[in-house]
Amino acid sequence: MSDKVLIVDDDEKLLKILSEALEKEDFVVSTAASAGEGLERFKEIDFDAVLVDLVLPDMDGIELLKTIRNIDSDFPVIMITGHASVDLAVKAMRMGAFYFIEKPASTKAIMEILKRAIEQKELILSYQSLKKTAEEKFRFSGIIGKSKQMQEIFELIERIASAEATVLIQGESGTGKELVAKAIHFNSPRKENRFVAINCSALPETLLESELFGYERGAFTGANKKKKGLFEIAHKGTIFLDEIVETSPAFQSKLLRVLEDKTFYPVGSTEEKKADTRILAATNRDIEDSVAGGRFRKDLYYRLNVVKISLPPLRDRKIDIPLLTQNFLKTYADKNRKDIVGVSDEAMEVLMRYSWPGNVRELENAIERAVILCQDQTIRAEHLPERTSRSEELEPSNILEYDMAKDSFEKKYLRNLLKHTEGNVTDASKIAQMTRQNIYLKLKKYDINPKVYYPRE
């Protein structure tokens, strides 16, 4: 398929020469004599690159460049002018121009630059496609993780979601037990029906029983009317019983009946009701210890523990911290209408060192706080809670995998390089002895915006 190029210039002679030369090289060429006409063409046709003259009759070429880049921030725009100056060239490149050509320029040189620009666009599109695929791989129904432990949990959820078996989810507070329960429900045949959750430790036994099984009018003081319980509300759906180990032996006996006979009695009723509800249970304690200590019924444990999912604490899957951080950063930056680009190397090192006793929930709260306190485009260590910055002895879990260590070095190198060049990618590529295309791809990979390093007006 031929590459499509738009040339915006009010020089009719140049338009004719360039069009003929490019068409001979199998380019499909569209021309426009003004910025307004060029912008209309750009919105109508899916071009691969645009050549823009700096001086146009209705708009400054730099303004057209800015407009195009606002529509598509990765689109390659090549500026061409007979009124060149160093200041104009620098301004154009900082606005995102792929290249700045001074007239007169040979058609051969222009074609070479166009080919390079289109090649970069294709590389970026390819990278974005790979990135999207990777993000989908590391995300499952709201749960995020690229670590081996989380990938295995994603696979297990996929296998068990369509089954009817009870599932026991075990993990420390803040590891995402309810998210896993929701993922199972919303990937199951029951997804069109209700998912209801209840924290068993938050209610006294009598209230927990009436909430789950419902009650008849007059069943107890204050029961002025009949009320449906959660088992009835979640008919043909899923019920999630969090902190199941905190329940009393009497309640455990009634729950066992539901699991064995699929029936229950509302409080104060002699009418048996059917329970067509899938039960998922969770605990943040060692349930085996509770069984051994006689605090939890062994027969109920076996009924609940048909499939067990053990969620690892965040300190044991630190490879997931950058991914989780970026996700929370985007969520809370959008929520608070802030243009925050990323996290400084120092802040990320703090996040990676800290042991996160509150797990993913604590990390989320820390990032929300940081977003609120941050006044520029980068979250720094001082924006994080003080407790996270306390030095900790380096443990095996704090030592990065080789690929992560290499990425950490590369990010720091690129940021320091851009600080030195004040965001000028062309100068950065010369110092690093890398192509601009390679620099841009790495900036995309690490979500580094060179504009952050431009000198402040």
Image (cartoon, rainbow, N blue to C red):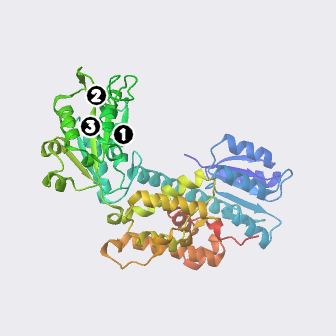
Q: Which image quadrant is residue 321 in?
A: bottom left
Query: Residue 123: percent from the left, percent from the top?
Result: 52, 58
The residue singled out by tag 3 in the image is 279
Q: Is disc 2 surrounded by few (<14), some (14 to 19) or many (20+) residues within 10 Å?
A: many
Residue at the right extreme? 57
Nearer to us of marks 2 and 3 is 2
Q: Which of the 4 quarters of the picture holds residue 191?
A: top left
- Which label number is shown at residue 197? 1
* Type of amino acid at the residue the image marks with label 3: Ile
CA gap, disc 2 and disc 1: 20 Å
Q: Are marks 3 and 1 in contact (CB under 8 Å)?
A: no
Q: Mark 2 or mark 1: which is in front?
A: 2
First in sequence, mark 3 or 1: give its number: 1
Amino acid type at image mark 2: Val
Position in image of residue 117 (x %, y %): 61, 59
Question: Residue 441 location, x and y as percent?
Answer: 52, 63
Q: Residues within 10 Å of mark 1 (few under 14, many from 20)?
A: some
Residue at position x 79%, y 59% in the image:
54
- Label 2 belongs to which residue? 267
Q: Is residue 323 visible?
A: no
Question: What amino acid type is highlighted by mark number 1?
Answer: Ala
Where disc 3 sits, the SS reads strand
Closer to the chain start, of discs 2 and 1, is 1
Q: Nearer the viewer, residue 142 or 106?
A: 142
